[in-house]
């Protein structure tokens, strides 16, 4: 049994050891650059946790874990182009530092690198592992497209929103766990329960992200507090507020969203005040906890020793209690 | 044994039967659109030819053949963004018809679709097949990057150029054949010989493309004759001309390349006249034939019935004798 920091360290070591070709440098330098920008490495840690849960050899899961982290960073590289994001973890994004063409093509190679890492599992589980990985990849792309469609949609329902974050964020957590479970020789039904744990925790994770954007401690939250409000992003909080507001409040809220003259700090304050009046934070937290509990219930039904489940419960509480 | 048109028909039928999800439509409509724009389907036909060469069941090779065609079209979708191409086979490119974001993300999903098709081979050959496919994908991306680097390079050698087209164009033909051979239960050494056939034919194929751009019959050649000359593209013809020109001719040639005032038709005529003076067409044809012959020699060394090799020889002559 391992602790989360131990697993993160094992992953970091494997990432540091990973070498990319040197030529053509426009393809490989951006991969090394983006992968080195950091992050908590929680997704690859999930692969190892899942293998360990079923008593498997975590060293068999390291390459697939790196595959998950490489795939995740590939999606960030391409998403940043589409979102025209200038910064990633405080550093210039790949398309800003190099060019859009480099970010497209280097991302494509990164995706192949992820596949090259993922196929390094025992051949008897290879078809299932790749089936999960492909489904995950399709889901993440679909989620990103639906998220982009939301930008221009007039109204988004909570149901549609949760479906979007399920695809864009949660299936990768579920997929990472399921792949780790298969490497740990779990049966398909046990692996599916762990997938459900990851999927629901993933939805809770994104809801917590939405809450932190507005209610996070500016000292601890890595991004600008209120960033979602300033970009009119249709988060759970805004969608719920639009749903619950009476006519007068709705008019006010839409006024702030449409205003071209309001200052950024005023806008964040005014929209937050409406959220407060409508009790949105507590509603969002209740929604988040509900998904976390569905996830924990799936975990409780898995046939594995309780002490091995501890790390996944700890992981769940980190996700929902985190302040950054 | 099958004829090339029979194989093309089998592939077209399988492509017509292929269904994509309907939602989100921005992801899947561009895939169906690009795949339906046509083309000779030679790459997937190669997969089937290779399986048939070794007496394998070509119906086991259809999904992997579609994987190769899907992958090829994915690279076109992304390359067209990078090359800012407005048209593909006379129709608007995906980034023109939809948007760049759609072309990036729809391309990413297309790549996953290719993987989903490719993993549908017998599990005992799956690791090798995916190894070939991954290496092929990396090669194609590297080739595209090197090709883009050539745009701003002052001077490119013939050796560097052939290495670029080997990666960008030829490895996919080799990879398609090797995968088909593995499905046909060929030994690795026989599959590698067929790879060499495809690789060298692929280089010949691109050299013929370079020749046709200048010397093709405008009625038969699908693109504008002289397009490479107008865009100063460093093709085999230009590279060789720059290498062989005496000082005065070199000055003339560079003058045409750098001129901002020369009319397009004058430029094509003037550069073609220099090519003619330097005998570039014959030199390029000799180079092309040399690669075709290396390929045919590799084919002759394969342990398979001569009558089954006929279709691949026919394919080789189509490639080098084609006028479009």
Image (spheres, coloured by chain):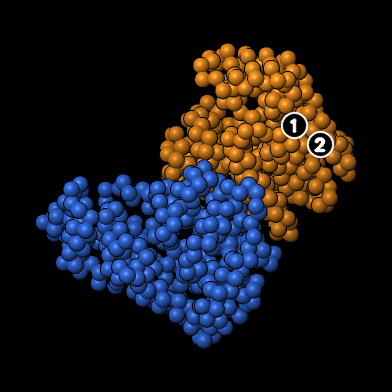
Chain colours: A orange, B blue
List x then y, in percent, for residue A23. 43, 48
Q: Secondary structure at mark 1?
A: helix
List x then y, in percent, for residue A271. 64, 17
Residue drawn at x 53%, y 30% as measured from the top left = A88
Residue drawn at x 64%, y 30% as measured from the top left = A234
In this image, B100 relative to A224: left or right? Answer: left
**Is A84 drawn above or below residue B67 in the view shown?**
above
Q: Label 1 vs label 2: CA separation?
A: 9 Å
- Residue at mark 2: chain: A
Q: Residue furthest left?
A: B248
Quickly name the residue at label 2. A295
- Image quadrant containing the N terminus of chain B: bottom right
Camera-side residue of A303 and B88: B88
In this image, A299 relative to B300: left or right? Answer: right
Asked if the residue at tag 2 contacts the one at tag 1, i.e. Cβ–Cβ closer than 8 Å, the answer is yes
Q: Secondary structure at mark 2?
A: helix
Quickly name the residue at label 1. A204
């Amino acid at each position: 049994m391992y602790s989360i920091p131990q697993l993160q360290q094992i992953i970091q070591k494997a990432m540091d050891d990973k070498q990319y070709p040197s030529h053509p440098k426009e393809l490989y330098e951006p991969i090394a650059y983006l992968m080195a920008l950091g992050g908590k490495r929680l997704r690859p840690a999930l692969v190892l946790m899942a293998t360990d849960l079923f008593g498997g050899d975590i060293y068999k899961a390291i390459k697939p874990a790196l595959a998950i982290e490489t795939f995740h960073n590939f999606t960030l590289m391409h998403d940043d182009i589409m979102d025209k994001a200038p910064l990633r973890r405080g550093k210039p994004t790949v398309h800003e530092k190099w060019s859009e063409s480099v970010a497209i093509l280097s991302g494509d190679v990164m995706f192949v690198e992820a596949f090259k890492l993922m196929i390094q599992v025992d051949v008897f589980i290879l078809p299932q592992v790749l089936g999960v990985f492909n489904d995950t990849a399709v889901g993440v792309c679909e989620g990103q497209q639906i998220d982009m469609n939301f930008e221009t949609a007039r109204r988004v329902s909570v149901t549609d929103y949760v479906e979007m974050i399920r695809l864009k964020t949660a299936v990768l957590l579920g997929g990472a766990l399921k792949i780790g479970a298969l490497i740990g020789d779990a049966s398909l039904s046990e692996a599916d329960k762990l997938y459900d744990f990851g999927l629901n925790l993933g939805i809770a994770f994104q809801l917590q992200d939405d809450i932190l954007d507005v209610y996070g401690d500016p000292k601890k939250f890595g991004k600008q507090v209120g960033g979602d409000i300033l970009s009119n992003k249709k988060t759970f909080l805004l969608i719920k507020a639009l749903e619950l507001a009476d006519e007068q409040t709705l008019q006010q809220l839409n006024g702030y969203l449409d205003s071209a003259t309001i200052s950024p700090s005023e806008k964040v304050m005014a929209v937050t005040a409406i959220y407060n009046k409508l009790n949105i934070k507590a509603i969002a937290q209740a929604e988040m906890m509900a998904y976390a509990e569905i996830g924990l219930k799936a975990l409780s039904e898995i046939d594995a020793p309780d002490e091995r489940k501890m790390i996944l419960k700890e992981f769940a509480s980190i996700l929902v209690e985190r302040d950054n």
